[in-house]
Amino acid sequence: MGAVRNGLVAVNDFFSTRPGRIGFFFVLALITLFLPVFFQAAGNVFMVRIFALVGIYVLLALGLNIVVGYAGLLNLGYIAFYAVGAYAGMNLGFLMQELLVGLGFLGERPENWSYWVLLPFAAVPGVLAGIMIGAPVLRLRGDYLAIVTLGFGEIVRIAITNDIAGITNGASGLPGVGQSVAPVAGQMWVRENLSFGNFLFSKDLYWYYIIVALVLFAIFVITRLDNSRLGRAWVAMREDEVAASSVGVNILTTKLWAFALGAAWGGIAGHTYAYWVGFISPESFNFMESVLVVCMVVLGGMGSIPGTILGAVIITAAPEIIRVAATSPVFAGFLTPEQAALVGDYRFLIFGGLMVVMMALRPQGILPSKRRARELHPIDDTILAQENQQLWEAEHKHESDSDLL
Amino acid sequence: MLNVKDLHTFYGKIEALKGISVEVNEGEIVTLIGANGAGKSTTLKTVSGQIAPRNGSIEFLGQQIAGMPSHQVTAKRVIQVPEGRRIFAQMTVRENLEMGAFLRTDKEEIAADLERVLELFPRLSERLAQKGGTLSGGEQQMLAIARGMMARPQLLMLDEPSMGLAPVIVEVIFETIKKLNKDGTTILLVEQNAAMALQVAHRGYVLETGSVALQGTGQELLRNERVRKTYLGEL
């Protein structure tokens, strides 16, 4: 144990230095940008898809992190915003396409601009849904809020499944019969111009880079938020609502902002997912998805951007890798093909166990924010000893001062 | 400055305030004393907007503030230092003080006020980088008052500032209250420690089961037979 701990400390020290950090980020950037290209070149499109999927979940986890990590409001129906974004994006896209064809703007080969045109507004449906669910339940806290948001998530899923608004095509999903999502503009261009030899600049690779760009944009915006007045209001509210309102924080709007800004990223992720995969159905938005996104935030570290990203990477990529590993020749001796195929289904069991272990050993997450770590894990011996020392000194200071009074 | 008239506040069906009228003039220290459940804190919470009154009026500088949410009352620079201190335990002392100036945007003035409150509570300046939760009870109370002062209150409302503190510290706190008042802050003080409160207060109100039983200057009330028996523990 000691050796492991010392090793970790050494690694940590190295990354705390400036060259260490720069080196780390450089390697990270190289992996992020070029590893998918390598997989694509090797003909492993499956891995490229997983990279893109991880990106989508990173976006979702970053959004939920605003609500759970910053504002301290547990939202168990977050995936509903993802669904709203996806369905709104696709339906508006169909509408746009019809309009353009009707007006005769499209030639023989329709290029689909809907994704790009709608992207700046992709957050809108999410935000509206966020305000809709947020406004009536803002007076609730903790468990009650969690239950209401859970209910909201289910309402949205069931409404979609039953095609309540007449635009979701129920359980069979979108696009329905007679509708189609044409390849998004740009996708064909990169395929024709950036492919060479055996290397094909595939649709999945194209979308991967879009998603990476969106994630970078999200990191930028959320970092700014964290350091803003609103960010401080969230911290204050999370610690003590009465005290926060007594210094002038408007609790209702502060919570509403958290809901709306969190939902915005859900909407953007949904919109992007819909155009990338080209098909959406209610199954993609079930309760387990919400739970998984919460797990990502909790596992990585609430309130921490690097933590949230790491959590999303682990939870999205792990089951896929386990599935691939199980069917690989290495395990062929232990597992029959049928058993190997089932391993993926055990992922929730593994996550459940992982969560229990986490909560017992490291409730603040793998890469927590400093503040959150203090809130969630004060039972650190060194911190505790330090606090006791300070308390002792503080108390005894009064005694020595009292002579002067 | 503050004019509370015939205030009725309910907790569900229980009528906690049964028509309370209290007045605070500019420059005064006014105290509300009384036993547990008399409605002292409820009055303060109603004024600060934490609870909405059912009936009655709360006028501050001629404006009606009854039923206004807390943050709007704070924006009028009617600042409440809540009962039990409620400092932000995980924020540092400095962050706590900065939160006190949350609604202000005048950076230079905020910095000047920070200097001022640290002068008032030198002990806090030694602990600027320390988390609020690691302070002792007395220091936390100082921090709570200092945080309130960072908003530049026109009216500072203190809810039981002596609660749970050693007598020495209580004296320090009351000295500070007097000093703040001398420097121009109007103060509404809710206290269980009637003797201390009446000594520093210009005027006082004695509350009993949701109504004002007695009122007068601090000295008058200190001499009052009934007050002496009931609240000062004299036989």
Image (cartoon, coloured by chain):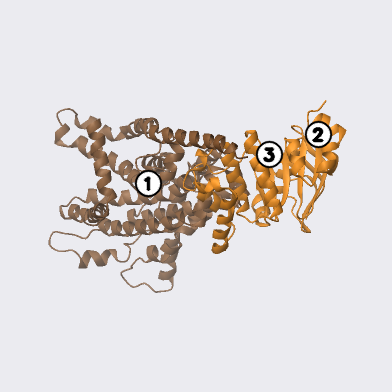
Chain colours: A brown, B orange
Residue holding disc 3: B160
The circle drawn on residue A308 is: 1
x and y percentages locating residue A11 in the rendered image: 24, 43
Label at residue B209: 2
Q: Residue at x 72, y 49 (%)?
A: B187
Query: Which residue: 58% across, 48% down?
Result: B121
The answer to whether A160 is drawn above or below residue A114 in the figure is above
Q: Amino acid at mark 1?
A: Thr
- Same chain? Circles 3 and 1: no
Outermost residue toward the left?
A197
| Front of the two marks 2 and 3 | 3
The local secondary structure at tag 1 comes to helix
Taking B87 as reference, is B160 left or right?
Answer: right
Amino acid type of the residue that numbered disc 2 sits on in the rendered structure: Thr
Measure the C-alpha gap from mark 3 to mark 1. Answer: 42 Å
Q: Chain of mark 2?
A: B
Question: Picture coordinates of residue A5 (x, y %)?
Answer: 26, 35
- The local crowd at label 2, few if under 14, some if 14 to 19, many if 20 or more residues have their Cα within 10 Å, is some
- Which residue occupies 48% across, 54% down? A261
Q: CA distance from mark 1 to mark 2?
A: 52 Å
Secondary element at image label 2: loop
**In the rendered image of this protein, does residue B13 appear above or below residue A252?**
above
Q: Is residue A190 above or below residue B37?
A: below
Q: Is residue A45 something one can see in this rendering?
A: yes
Query: What label sits on residue A187 in the rendered view?
Result: none
Observer able to see residue A164: no
Chain letter for mark 3, please: B
Determine whether, in the image, residue A19 is placed left or right of residue A403: left
| Cα distance in 3D space between marks 2 and 3 | 18 Å
Quarter holding the C terminus of chain B?
A: top right
Q: Do the residues bearing badges 3 and 1 touch, measured as CB atoms within 8 Å?
A: no
